[in-house]
Image (tube, rainbow, N blue to C red):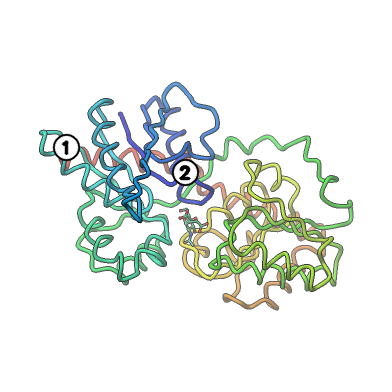
Amino acid sequence: MNIAIVCYPTFGGSGVVATELGIALAKRNHQVHFVTYKQPVRLGLLSPNIHFHEVTVPEYPLFQYQPYELALSSKLVNTVKKHKIDVLHVHYAIPHAYAGYMAKKMLAEEGIHIPMITTLHGTDITLVGNHPFYKPAVTFSINESDIVTSVSQSLKEDTLRLFDLTKEIKVVPNFIDASSHQTAFTDCQRELMATPEERIITHISNFRPVKRIQDIIAVFYQVQKEIPAKLLMVGDGPERKPAEAKCKELGIKDKVIFLGNSNEIDKILCFSDLFLLPSERESFGLAALEAMINKVPVISSNTGGIPEVNIQGVSGYLSDVGDIDAMAANALKILRDDAVLATFKQGAYNEAMKFDIESIVPLYLSLYEEALALV
Ligand code: GMT
């Protein structure tokens, strides 16, 4: 099959999922065409079946806002025609489903009919798409998609509650490539980050307000008072600077390491003992799943789709959003004792295995077949 994938190429769950899906499809001998404004960050080595088409928006001084949707839909039309694309899969509704719909319409004028699958990821529904400025366009482009999927049951319910939809939503959970985590790293280099007696706690995100970065610092502050520990903060975004300032104010600057964006997530998780994800909202929590496949238990909030991934008392613990005391107490419950930590590490890994890519890619492929039959 020739498949065009539209996604955000930057650090962020939806782009990661789209990229990993594309790589997996390419390994299964499908031709995968990424159409976006930059090479996706996780698309390291280009395989023979992977193609990248850059969307460029020429600057024109007359425009206050450069029209990305217009450039994207034109690029899609050209790509579909040139590479005989069978299926268009757009990740994140805004503005991808909208641009995809326009491309479909333009192609239909020329007698080319391709189906569009839209995958909803979270903030496109719960934060941004829900705003009155966007809502009519988002509702329209979801309803006009041939097939709509959401990455969790919770996101499906949110979407049905927030939007007036006529379209069925199918849940296809996010996934992890378990095969790439079967051999333990031998060059873990834990000693670069912490002394042997210190526990390593990690957080990875784009440091937006929704991630509640200050809660992470507050939880860690309590934990490090009880046991020797280091906190690794991976990623970058608007909440990073205030978090650094808070660490300084609390006198824990030397125990918190801000690493910035990284493409070596697995290497960092390899020596982590615990992962913190206290988000305000989270449609799935891919970062938690990535931690779990690396045998890192998770302390999280119980919001959105996180309870579908992090299982209470098995892969970690969940608490109400903002309940810092409970999160710190649960973190200590796991970290104080080697045997307890080992049990949670195994529990995290076992739960992550339920989201192995091998069982999810066939779901997308059968949806592509279903979509093809619709046009
Ligand atoms: O919140 C992020 O880190 C980025 C955001 C995105 O759009 O890329 O992530 C969303 O999609 C991920 C992949 O499906 C989910 O795992 C995240 O939970 C979701 N984020 C939110 O719902 C806040």
Amino acid found under the numbered disc labelled 2: Pro
Q: CA distance from mark 2 to mark 1?
A: 25 Å
Q: For residue 79, which quarter of the picture?
A: top left
The tag earlier along the polypeptide, 2 or 1, is 2
Q: Residue furthest top?
A: 48
Residue at image location 37% in from the left, 48% down from the top: 91
The front one of 308 and 45 is: 45
Residue at mark 1: 107
The front one of 97 and 190 is: 97
- Residue 191, position as x, y percentages in the image: 85, 45
- Residue 358, position as x, y percentages in the image: 47, 38
Of the numbered discs in the image, which one, if any, rests on residue 9?
2
Secondary element at image label 1: helix
Of the numbered discs in the image, which one, if any, rests on residue 133?
none
Report the quarter where the N terminus lies.
Answer: top left
Residue at image location 24% in from the left, 36% down from the top: 77
Figure check: 99 above or below 78: below
Crowding around mark 1 (Cα neighbors within 10 Å: few <14, some 14 to 19, many 20+) is some
Amino acid found under the numbered disc labelled 1: Leu
